[in-house]
């Protein structure tokens, strides 16, 4: 598996994400936001957490217009895999690769804690390492993680089995408790919680490992 | 020429910041405040001849997220 991790000014989970990919057996290349092309032969692009461009205007809005993201969009449109975590999820909604938007947390506070997630579907290459219905513990760390979409979009996501994870105890007001969603072709995942921060015994939890291992299993075989 | 763009959360989208400001106004004793919505104003300094359509395109592509926000443009 060859992974690229995009680095924006203000990204701060880029190295954690790279290590999680590497520990799953991936060869990882870091890609700068001003680059215009992804390196050749990339299987998956990781868009990391952080505060790209200082969260100016709206979280992820300026990153979504950066040169490298045009190339990430083209990669996704060719059927390539993309995974956006936290600020990365915000970037993916701003590009339109995933529907909806992330609003300010309903309680207005930045929340940093480990939360329970229910795996809603194992029908994706990100989540086949889990069973649907599994409860896993993954940290969140965000101020704008309140998932919003119009009722038709929410119903479509649910009807098409595209809700990947929900919160067991909704921390931020997200509609339908949504913590992570998949694209129509199930190859783009956006999620607010940080699986790369639950990927080593030293993190205090390893429930995120199954996600990276599952991806490596699929993308190495391919 | 200048353009002033007002960006607001759409009706029906919860505005927790507006709600918090509303609570604060109530707590301070201001009466008769039925609702507060908080948005933002963006001022653009533009070349003469820039059209409203150009500014609308800027709003659609970057300045507003039309999934959750609406915008209005004033040219002067």
Image (tube, coloured by chain):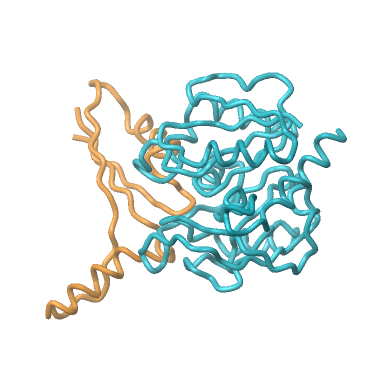
Chain colours: A cyan, B orange
> A56 left or right of A37?
left
User: Which residue is at a point 13% across and 77% down the rendered structure image?
Assistant: B28
Q: Is residue A7 above or below residue B9?
A: above
Closest to the observer, A6 or B69: A6
Closest to the observer, B55 or A4: A4
User: Which residue is at a point 55% across and 47% down the rendered structure image?
Assistant: A89
In the rendering, at what x and y percent does residue A28 appear? 66, 29
Query: Which quarter of the picture shows residue A51?
Result: top left
Quadrant housing the N terminus of chain A: top right
Query: Which quarter of the picture shows residue A59?
Result: top left
Quadrant housing the C terminus of chain A: top right
Q: Is residue B60 above or below residue A150?
A: above
In the rendering, at what x and y percent does residue A129 appear? 79, 54
Q: Seen from this angle, which residue lies furthest right? A: A221
In the rendering, at what x and y percent does residue A18 appear? 61, 36
User: Which residue is at a point 66% across and 61% down the rendered structure image?
Assistant: A165
Query: Which quarter of the picture shows residue A205?
Result: bottom right
Q: Is residue A27 above or below residue A140?
A: above
Q: Is residue A6 above or below residue B20?
A: above
User: Which residue is at a point 39% across and 51% down the rendered structure image?
Assistant: B70
Closest to the observer, A107 or B45: A107
In the rendering, at what x and y percent does residue A218 appear? 83, 41
Closest to the observer, A139 or A181: A139
């Amino acid at each position: 598996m060859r992974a690229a991790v995009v680095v924006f000014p203000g990204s701060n989970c880029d190295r954690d994400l790279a290590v999680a990919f590497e520990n799953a057996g991936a060869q990882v290349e870091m890609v700068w936001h001003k680059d215009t092309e992804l390196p050749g032969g990339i299987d998956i692009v990781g868009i990391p957490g952080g505060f790209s461009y200082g969260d100016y205007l709206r979280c992820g809005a300026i990153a979504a217009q950066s040169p490298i993201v045009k190339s990430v969009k083209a990669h996704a449109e060719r059927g390539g895999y993309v995974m956006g975590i936290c600020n990365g999820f915000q970037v993916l909604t701003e590009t339109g690769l995933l529907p909806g938007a992330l609003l300010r947390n309903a309680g207005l506070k930045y929340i940093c804690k480990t939360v329970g997630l229910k795996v809603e579907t194992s029908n994706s290459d990100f989540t086949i390492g889990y069973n649907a219905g599994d409860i896993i513990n993954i940290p969140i760390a965000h101020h704008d993680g309140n998932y919003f979409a119009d009722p038709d979009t929410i119903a479509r996501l649910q009807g098409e089995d595209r809700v990947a994870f929900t919160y067991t105890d909704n921390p931020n007001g997200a509609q339908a408790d949504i913590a992570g969603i998949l694209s129509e072709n199930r190859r783009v995942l956006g999620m607010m919680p940080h699986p790369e921060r639950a990927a080593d015994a030293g993190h205090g939890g390893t429930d995120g490992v199954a996600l990276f291992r599952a991806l490596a299993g699929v993308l190495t075989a391919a | 020429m200048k353009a002033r763009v007002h960006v607001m959360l759409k009706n029906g989208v919860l505005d927790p910041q507006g709600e918090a400001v509303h609570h604060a106004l109530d707590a301070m004793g201001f009466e008769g405040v039925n609702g507060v919505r908080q948005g933002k104003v963006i001022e653009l300094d533009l070349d003469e001849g820039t059209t409203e359509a150009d500014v609308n395109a800027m709003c659609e592509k970057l300045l507003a997220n039309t999934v959750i926000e609406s915008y209005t443009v004033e040219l002067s």
